[in-house]
Image (cartoon, helix red, strand yellow):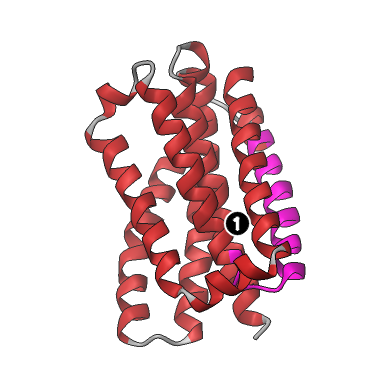
Amino acid sequence: MIKVYSVVACMLFFTTLCVICVIKSPKLLTYFEESGSVLFVCIGFVIAGIIMQTCCRHTFRQSPMNYILLAYFTISWSVMTAGFCAYADWRIVLICSIMTSLMSFSLVMVAFCIKHEMTWCYGIGATFMLSVWPAIIFAIVDPKRSFYTMLAFIGTILASCYIIIDTEKVMETYGATNEYIYGALALYKDILVMFISLLSILGTSNR
């Protein structure tokens, strides 16, 4: 379990460095703001990584492929997150970072306190996962701020559910085996989804 959270901490540290570099560098900030296609390319790399992880699960569970997947996820998610932060005020980014840290810590503590008694989280997580797709369709058809805010709220709730779910898996499965890389990837994705969702909510309300 210590390995899982150590890897997650290193991944989040790298992501934080990427975000700081983009926010503090006028050239990088301008580049991301003027080249919107860069962010879409990063999102494409993130989706490709998720597909590879899902379809080639057995391949990427073995060393050294699991470390390659770890590096790929860390770089692609970090650049994508930095790209989202480039469109927000640095104060909003700081507030979202603090909120994400506090919420993630609280949810992990909840998972530790109520372990073996939270199968209901799977149902809630699946329900909200299904509810994301209509929200995406509405956001594409009628791109208003209210729909983006609703989508961000759903993403925040979904990420919260899966932080608890993946923490349970870390305690029961990933932490007790050599698959700690997979546990770290799961928690890392959950935390960044929560951060990006909060950034969307506060960024929209600040405009």
Q: Which residues are magenta?
A: 85-109
18 lies above or below 166: below
Question: In the rendered view, would you say 161 is above or below 206?
Answer: above
Q: Nearer the viewer, residue 169 or 3?
A: 3
Residue at the left extreme? Answer: 55
Q: Give coordinates of residue 40: x percent, y percent.
A: 39, 65
**Principal SS element in the magenta part?**
helix
Classify mark 1: helix, strand or loop.
helix
Viewport quadrant of the C terminus:
bottom right
Q: Is residue 88 magenta?
A: yes
Rendering quarter of residue 8:
top right
Residue 76: x and y in percent read 45, 48
Figure check: 112 above or below 147: above
Specify whether residue 77 is in view.
yes
Mark 1 residue type? Phe
Q: Nearer the viewer, residue 167 or 96?
A: 96
Q: Which residue is mark 1?
A: 195
Residue name at image x 75 percent, y 63 percent: 95
Q: Residues within 10 Å of mark 1 (few under 14, many from 20)?
A: many
Task: Tell me which residue sits at (45%, 18%) in the image.
Answer: 173
User: On the rendered structure, is 43 left or right of 104?
Assistant: left
x, y percent for residue 206: 68, 82
Q: Is residue 60 left or right of residue 56?
A: right
